[in-house]
Amino acid sequence: MKKIVSLIVSMFMILSLCACSGPKKEDVIPFFEAFDRTLDLDSGEFSGMVKYSVDEDINNMFLSFSLIQTGDMQLAVNLGLEANGNKLDDFINFYIKDGKTYLNYLGQTSQSVAENIGINPKKKLSLSNPFLDYTDSELTSLFSKVEKSKDTYHMDLKAGNISKILDEFGGIQVEDAHMDVTLKKGYISHLVFKLNGTQSLGKEPTPVTITFDGKLTNINSLTSVSFPEDLTSY
């Protein structure tokens, strides 16, 4: 009888440990609150890189922008690409100034009015938050482990749940995913994300690695955006 009681007590202890081992909502909600707040910032400068590796092919995308969206919007975006040993630092340059848009695409320039492409320069950019309709429990269920070190969160994501989200973007089977997020005054100032998995591009699954590393500076304190001197000639 004592052995049976001991076994039952042991089972309850194991279940209790399992229940407590996962992250709690207070471990992850600050990240999502900061994510939503960051999408709605007044101004800032961003620089980052996305590395997409499929089998032995490596493709890099470099993105930087400066944005002020209080009063008349000012925006400067630069997109660079690197693939198969070839690199284009200025693949696309896009600007918004004085209600007009300016585009430089591989040396071909053009200009238009911001409202003609659905941008109201008097209002903030409308950036959709894909997690807005998630409950706290659903957000927490995306992670298997969360640790905090000062202002940085180290987060392991559940592969199965991330795979379901990525199914909408081409079907990557996730093996593991990790994220390091640094918060500053309630905003995301640095985010590093790495995902390993496979993608069915043919008959056999192909190894895929996706890495994102981005930093946001001058959050809500940027006072000016730098533009090329020849904008009016676009």
Image (tube, rainbow, N blue to C red):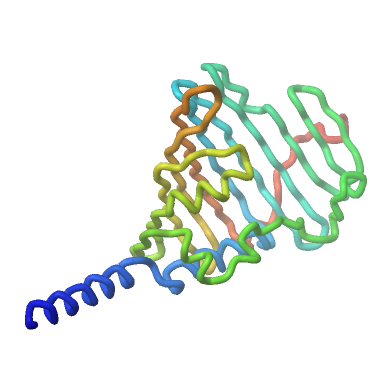
Quarter holding residue 155: bottom left
Image height of 23 relative to 53, above or below: below
Between 62 and 32, the one lying in front of the other is 32
Give x and y (percent) for residue 231: 82, 35
Between 22 and 106, the one lying in front of the other is 22
Between 145 and 183, the one lying in front of the other is 145
Q: Residue shown at 69%/62% (left/top)? A: 42
Furthest residue toward front: 1
Give x and y (percent) for residue 154: 38, 57
Furthest residue toward left: 2
Give x and y (percent) for residue 6: 12, 78
Between 154 and 44, the one lying in front of the other is 154
Check the picture and name the quadrant holding the N terminus: bottom left
- The answer to whether residue 116 is left or right of residue 38 is right
Give x and y (percent) for residue 181: 45, 56
Q: Residue shown at 86%/31% (left/top)? A: 110
Check the picture and name the quadrant holding the C terminus: top right
Task: Count the numbered circles shown.
Answer: 0
Image height of 19 relative to 177, above or below: below
Quarter holding residue 26: bottom left
- The answer to whether residue 192 is left or right of residue 36 is left
Q: Residue shown at 47%/24% (left/top)? A: 204
Q: Residue shown at 50%/50% (left/top)? A: 162
